[in-house]
Structures are given as structure tokens and as C-alpha cells.
Image: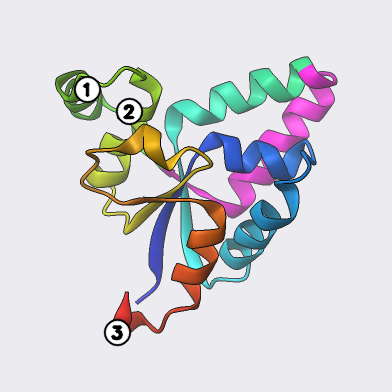
């Protein structure tokens, strides 16, 4: 069975914006998802933020291309009323992280991959750094 990972927006942006020194590790995660080694998901609200940030960093065509590229590789984890209510109930300092954690749980993800695992303290879905995620993906399914 494929491992399901919710990929935090910071990891996706590392690839799309080629942000050193994080881009190579993030690109390896993207490649693992694209190659079918894992099922990668993005929380729905991250797609709109991604488009906004990519457009702001360059132009609208770049924002559209980034969004299309992401949607061709990653599934979208729903963010609905129940997910938002769960995120509010978590009472975390960073509401966006809480929404990602609630979305990951609701979508049956095994892990969240983020450059800020400490931001997900208390999540029922473990948060791993991109390097830890690569190690996790290389484990045989029976050990995960």
C-alpha cells in the first residue's frame, strides 16, 4: 500500500521557486510522488496560496503554470467545515498549520512533510522534515 503524505506548502515552494538549500530534497519528494512511490496531497487552501505566491514572485503565467504542475502530480486534501472546526479546536498559534494537520488526519495521511515539524507538535499525524520524509519513504511498507 502506498504511503500517503501531506506536503506542506513550504516544501512545494522550495521546488517551484528553486529555493536553496532546500530545493534538492524537496525535489526528491516531488519525484517520489510523481514516480508513484508515495501518494502526495496538498491541503486545498494551499493551492490558492501557492498561486498567489508564485504569481507575486514572477507573473500570472508563472502562477498558472505552477498551479497546473502541482495539480498534475498531487492530490488535493479537502478543507471543509469539519476540517476547519477541528483546526480551530486545536487552538494552535499557527492556524494554517492546524488546518494542514486536520486535513492530513481527515485524508488518512501517514505523515506531514514540512520544513517546520515543530509547528505540528500535537498533531495526530506525525510531521517530518523533508530529509526524514525521504528516509520514511525508503522504509519497506511493513516497517512504516
Identify the residue under disc 3.
142
Residues 140 and 108: in front is 140
Magenta span contains residue 65? yes
Q: Using a 10 Å C-alpha cutoff, classify the residue at mark 1 as few (fewer than 14 neighbours), some (14 to 19) or many (20 or more).
A: few
For the residues labelled 3 and 1, the Cα–Cα distance comes to 34 Å
SS for callout 1: helix
Residues at marks 1 and 2, CA–CA distance in whole angstroms: 11 Å
Residue 75: percent from left, percent from top: 48, 49
Number of other residues with Cα within 10 Å of mark 2, as a class: few under 14, some 14 to 19, many 20 or more: many
Q: Position of residue 63 (x, y in %)?
A: 74, 26
| Residue 131 in which image quadrant | bottom right
Dot 3, how many residues are within 10 Å of its Cα: few (below 14), some (14-19), or many (20+)? Answer: few
Is residue 74 magenta-colored?
A: yes
Residue 8: mark in rendering: none
- Residue 7 vertical placement versus 80 (above, below): below
Q: Which residue is mark 2?
A: 99
Distance of label 2 from label 3 (alpha carbons): 29 Å
Residue 64 falls in image quadrant: top right
Residue 42 screen position, x and y as percent: 47, 42
Q: Which mark is residue 81?
A: 1
Highlighted range, magenta: 57-76
Q: Position of residue 110 (x, y in %)?
A: 32, 59
In the image, what residue occupies the spot 74% across and 55% down? 24
Q: Residue at x 39, y 23 (%)?
A: 96
Figure quadrant of the N terminus = bottom left
Q: At numbered mark 3, what does the secondary structure look like: helix, strand or loop?
A: helix
Does label 3 or label 1 sit earlier along the sequence?
A: 1
Q: Quadrant of residue 58?
A: top right
Residue 114, relative to residue 85: is it above or below?
Answer: below
Which tag is nearer the camera, tag 1 or tag 2? Answer: 2
Up-down: is 11 above or below 82? below
Amino acid at each position: 500500500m502506498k504511503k500517503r503524505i501531506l506536503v506542506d506548502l513550504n516544501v512545494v515552494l522550495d521546488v517551484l521557486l528553486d529555493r536553496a538549500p532546500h530545493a534538492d530534497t524537496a525535489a526528491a519528494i516531488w519525484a517520489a510522488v510523481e514516480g508513484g512511490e508515495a501518494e502526495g496531497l496538498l491541503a486545498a487552501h494551499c493551492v490558492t496560496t501557492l498561486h498567489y505566491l508564485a504569481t507575486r514572485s514572477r507573473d500570472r503565467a508563472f502562477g498558472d503554470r505552477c498551479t497546473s504542475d502541482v495539480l498534475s502530480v498531487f492530490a488535493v486534501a479537502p478543507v471543509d467545515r469539519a476540517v476547519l472546526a477541528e483546526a480551530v479546536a486545536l487552538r494552535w498559534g499557527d492556524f494554517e498549520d492546524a488546518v494542514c494537520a486536520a486535513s492530513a488526519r481527515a485524508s488518512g495521511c501517514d505523515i506531514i512533510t514540512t520544513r517546520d515539524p515543530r509547528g505540528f507538535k500535537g498533531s495526530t499525524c506525525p510531521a517530518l522534515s523533508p530529509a526524514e520524509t525521504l528516509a520514511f519513504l525508503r522504509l519497506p511498507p511493513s516497517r512504516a
